[in-house]
Amino acid sequence: MKFDVVVVGAGPAGSAAAYLLAKKGFRTLLVDRGRGLGDKELFGGRVYAQPLRDVWPELDKEAPIQRWVTRERISVVSGDNVITVEYKAGSKKSFTALLPQLASWMSRKAEQAGAVFVNEVTVDELVVKDGKFVGVRSGSDVIEADVVIDAEGVNRLLLERAGIVERLKPDHIALGVKEVLRTGAPQLEAAFGIDSDEGVAWVVVGDVTRGVPGGGFIYTNKDTVSIGVVLHLRHALEAVEKGILKDHVSELVEGFRLHPFFRKLWKDATISEYGAHLTIEGGLKFSPPRLVYPGLLIVGDAAGLLLTTGVNYRGVDYAVYSGKLAAEAVEYARDHGGLTYENLKAYEEKVKGSFMYRDLIRHTAAEALMNNPELFSRLPGLMTKVLAGIYEQDYSVKTPFEAITEALTSEGVDLFSLISLAWLAVRGL
């Protein structure tokens, strides 16, 4: 059996590519190892809308959107002390979602457009003939294609076997663990101080990860709350070796859920879902040497197209947009002499000319910031001690300078280190 295009992976990137290609008349096969549509998809829970609208203009009306994000909160945690900043957002820029539902909707759209979707199939290798990728093999079955689009995600086993990328290293990845807490919409809205048409996206740094680079997250859904922690894997392993991190990652999530400040937000909630997911760190450093090979395009997480700055996380929308660019490149190649390597290279050119690539280049300093243990260990304690010095008074009133000086001494941080970290934060964020 032969198709024009075989897409491996029915996540956001693969489904977007398959949808657009099928609409343009390409015989498209979308293959995934999950049991059902969206079965193996897991992430924190927040999606930026506009890149998805470029693929599915009907997104706002049809997609399984949980809540539009109208409140942005950032908290710094040290022990029981918490500092929180809130921003009230305006127009519909991002929304919360449960990715299995969203990915299922995307895959179903691809099917409706004419793509053939096959699930519970593990692709074992990319088939190469005379230096060109010509299909995929699953067991003893070979499916031929003029073009293969690799959308397998962070676990790039096919690209490893093809010799395109090396095995994953702890430097490359972070581990995210998530719980979905069922509260009921009225209780959720009362606890978070929002209306039925509002939602919250909340970033938490500090003791929720025991000082390991990473952070916590909270996203409000219709009648559930998604919470979790993300740990940079290399730093987590080092913290375990040094005895700094003694808790299992599941205990970190439990500690976050039971924290005195946060637990009232989901009082009496029940855990309805639990899961873990690997995500990439380093963006372009994780990218393959090229995104285009003869007969092969690489999209989404597998291509290193994901941005993490600490306050912004752009994953699903980048994946969808890369799938869109891949589909456009295949169409361009067909209309300009055939699906040759030279014509397919239009995909890499499109990626490098996109907002994604510009942002990944502009935010390279964020990686150094997110890998700085000081930001997650000593800085939260310093910040809370400064405010404690200003507000927790008996008789005399401390000046802000006195409060800062005492906090620096207490946390063992010199002023030069603080200024250096602040400058790194400004550049990285």
Image (cartoon, helix red, strand yellow):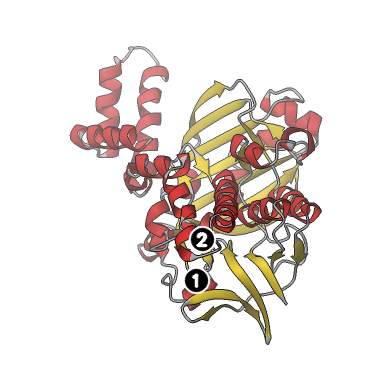
Say which element carries label 1. Answer: helix
- x and y percent of residue 364 in the render? 34, 45
> Is residue 261 visible to us here?
no
- Whether tag 2 and tag 1 are in contact, CB under 8 A, the answer is yes
- x and y percent of residue 295 in the render? 53, 68
Q: Circle 2: is it few (<14), some (14-19), or many (20+) Cα within 10 Å?
A: many
* In this picture, residue 381 sits left or right of residue 297: left
Q: Earlier in the sequence, mark 2 or mark 1?
A: 1
Q: Which mark is residue 159?
A: 1
Residue 337 position by quadrant: bottom right
Q: Circle 1: is it few (<14), some (14-19), or many (20+) Cα within 10 Å?
A: some
In which quadrant will I find the C terminus? Answer: top left
- x and y percent of residue 123 in the render? 64, 75
Relative to 78, say whether 287 is above or below: below
- Give the camera-side residue of 43 and 224: 43
Toward the left, the furthest residue is 416
The type of residue carrying mark 2 is Ala
* In this picture, residue 172 sits left or right of residue 218: left
Residue at the (73%, 60%) spot, across then down: 39
Residue at the (76%, 63%) spot, across then down: 117
How many numbered marks have been drawn onto this rendered protein structure? 2
Residue at the (74%, 71%) spot, across then down: 120
Q: Which mark is residue 302?
A: 2
- Give the camera-side residue of 205 and 195: 195
Distance Cα–Cα, label 2 vs label 1: 9 Å
